[in-house]
Structures are given as C-alpha cells and as structure tokens.
Amino acid sequence: MIKVNTPMLSNCSRGVRRYYSRVSEVLHDEKIPCSRFERFFKGFLTFDIKGGVLWSPGQGGTLISKKHIVTCHDVIDFTYYGGGVKNQIKKLIHSYIYQRALNIVFISDSTKLEFEKVFPNNSSRKTVIKSAVDMDLVFNFKVDVLIKNKLKANQYFILVTNAMPHKNNRIFIDAIQVLSKEGVSAVIVGDLSEEDKERTKKTANILHLNGLENDELFTLVKESRGLVSTSLVEGHNLTIAEALSLEKTVIASDIDVHREFYNGYCLFFNPNDNQSLAELLKEVYFDRIELPVYSKQDLKCWRAVGEEYKSLFHSYK
C-alpha cells in the first residue's frame, strides 16, 4: 500500500506548488489512501510509501527515513554559488540525503548532468522523469490589476523573477533602459536585490511589483507583449511553461535546460549580452520577427508525470 501525505509546499515557489498539486492529483485519482506523516521540516510534499520510503520534490525535504526517493529540481546553489560555509554545510547535508536514497529522480537531463558534476561519487540509482511542458492549468484573471497600475495590454514585456543572482535580472533592466527612447516598457514581478530595486526606481519605463495574487500575475502575463526569462541556470523554469499555456511569446536565455524543454517554442538570446536582448525585444515589440508557433500536440502533460511517479512508487512496494 502506498500512503500519500497531505501536500505541504508553502516554502516552495508558487509555480512549484501549482505544479505538484496537479501531479499529486494522479495519485489521489487512483484512490491511493492518504495519511499524514510527521515531519521536522515543513514546506515539502512528501510521499510515505510502505517500508518508510519518502518522496520530496524539494531539494531536501524531511527525509528522516532510512529509505527514500528524492526529486532533485536543480543544483543551482552548488553549481552557481560555490563556496561559503553555509552553502558547504548545505551541500554536505544534501550529499548525505542523496547517498541514502533508493532513487534520485531528476526533472531534466540537464539537472542530472549538473548533479553528477557536483556529486560525482554518489552511487544511488538515478532516474529522469522530465517535467511537464503542457501545464493544462485553469487560469483565473483579474483585469483590475492593469487599471490599477495604468498598464495597456500588449504594450509591455514581463519578467517574473526573484532576487537570487542566477536569475540575472540586471541584463533585463539594462536592456529595457536601452529601449526607453523606443517606447518599450516592462513589468518586473517578484523580489529584487536592493541594487536592482534602486535601478528600477530610476528607470521610468520599468514598473516593479511584488506580492501579487495568482490571478493578478496570470493577468499581467496574459496581457503582456511577451514573457522574458534571463536565467543563467534553471532546473526547468515552470514560468515559461505557464506563459506558453497562455499562448504568449517567450524570450528566453539560451541555456541548456531551456533548449531541452522549450526548443522551437521560444526566442533565444545570449544571457551575457544585454544589447542582444534589447535588439530581440525591439524586434518582437515592433513585429519585425517571426514568432514561434505554440502547440500542445505531443507535449508532455503533468498527468503523465504523475503516472511515471506512480509506476516508480509501485516498483518499491
């Protein structure tokens, strides 16, 4: 019998919470009994399988069992941030958790390759269950957010981000500043570093918002000229998948994981060159470039991901 505990993803991003809430529906649809499992750390969705096997879609989660399955979303902290006492301690803890795992599941081939660079001596079994691209979400919208912020539909680009350095927000701010005389504007949603906050305040054509509700965020993405992702590294980038579900143009940094999931569906730019991003945004804004055509056909859906996890769980019954 597989026992699935109540999902708790409060410490993860909203995109991750939405995603795994859908994936877990596959298990609930199959009427697999649900039960709570006591945890030392909150914030991770954990599956308690017969024999004390746990699954956590967070990087760590509460893996107090001797046997567990852990899903590795990314290894950004270790590949990008490198040293520092806090990060090294975190790496040691993760190494211990990963080494005790029955199976480490990676959400992309790119993530698996990064993991093997950082943890070359790990001997646990490794499986890739690729994340979904077709999110099949039911979106709710709140058009008041446009009126409240004096925004016009289809007249701005949007960046959904956070303050972590690998998000590479500065290149987007620089590109929009370059385009200020062209009438191109932008909305940045999410937390920024103090330096980037100051720079956006001094840039008239950038609006910075934070703490939005989901329906407000989806409205801003839906009504934008396109979504931009400037990341230097990612595990998947669910924000792009959501934007594609809204049939929006996506301008993404040319990195391995973006090519793995979204090749043919996005316009790509060099994430180290703000001028190339500015030129691409200008081409899109003034309709001077052919845009990729998005189609759900043959795209992996969240339900398929859930079915793969279910098969994996059953193999350890």
Image (spheres, rainbow, N blue to C red):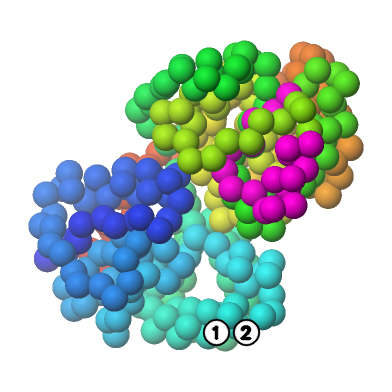
Locate the C terminus by quadrant. bottom left
Q: Quadrant of residue 127?
A: bottom left
**Residue 297 visible, this angle:** no
Q: Which mark is residue 140?
A: none
* Label 1 – label 2 distance at C-alpha: 6 Å
Residue 114 image offset from top left, x and y in percent: 63, 67
Q: Looking at numbered disc 2 in the image, what kind of residue is underneath it?
A: Val
The residue under the point 57% across, 43% down is 190
Q: Is residue 278 left or right of residue 20?
A: right
Q: Nearer the viewer, residue 312 or 17?
A: 17
Q: Is residue 159 magenta?
A: no
User: Can you say whether 44 is above or below 119 in the image?
Assistant: above
Residue 245 image offset from top left, x and y in percent: 48, 28
The residue under the point 26% across, 55% down is 7
User: Can you say whether 266 is above or below 56 in the image?
Assistant: above
Q: Quadrant of residue 313?
A: bottom left
**Residue bearing the label numbered 1:** 89
Count residues near mark 2 (Cα–Cα under 10 Å), then give few for <14, some for 14-19, many for 20+.
Answer: few
User: Can you say whether 9 is above or below 214 in the image?
Assistant: below
Q: Nearer the viewer, residue 8 or 63?
A: 8
**Residue 249 visible, this angle:** yes
Residue 88 image offset from top left, x and y in percent: 60, 83
Do the numbered discs 1 and 2 sit on residues whose CB atoms are within 8 Å? yes
**Residue bearing the label numbered 2:** 85
Residue 150 image offset from top left, x and y in percent: 60, 17
Q: Which residues are magenta?
A: 185-202
Kindly state the secondary structure of the residue where label 2 is placed.
helix
Q: Looking at numbered disc 1 in the image, what kind of residue is underneath it?
A: Ile
Kindly state the secondary structure of the residue where label 1 is placed.
helix
Q: Is residue 303 left or right of residue 234?
A: left
Locate the N terminus by quadrant. bottom left
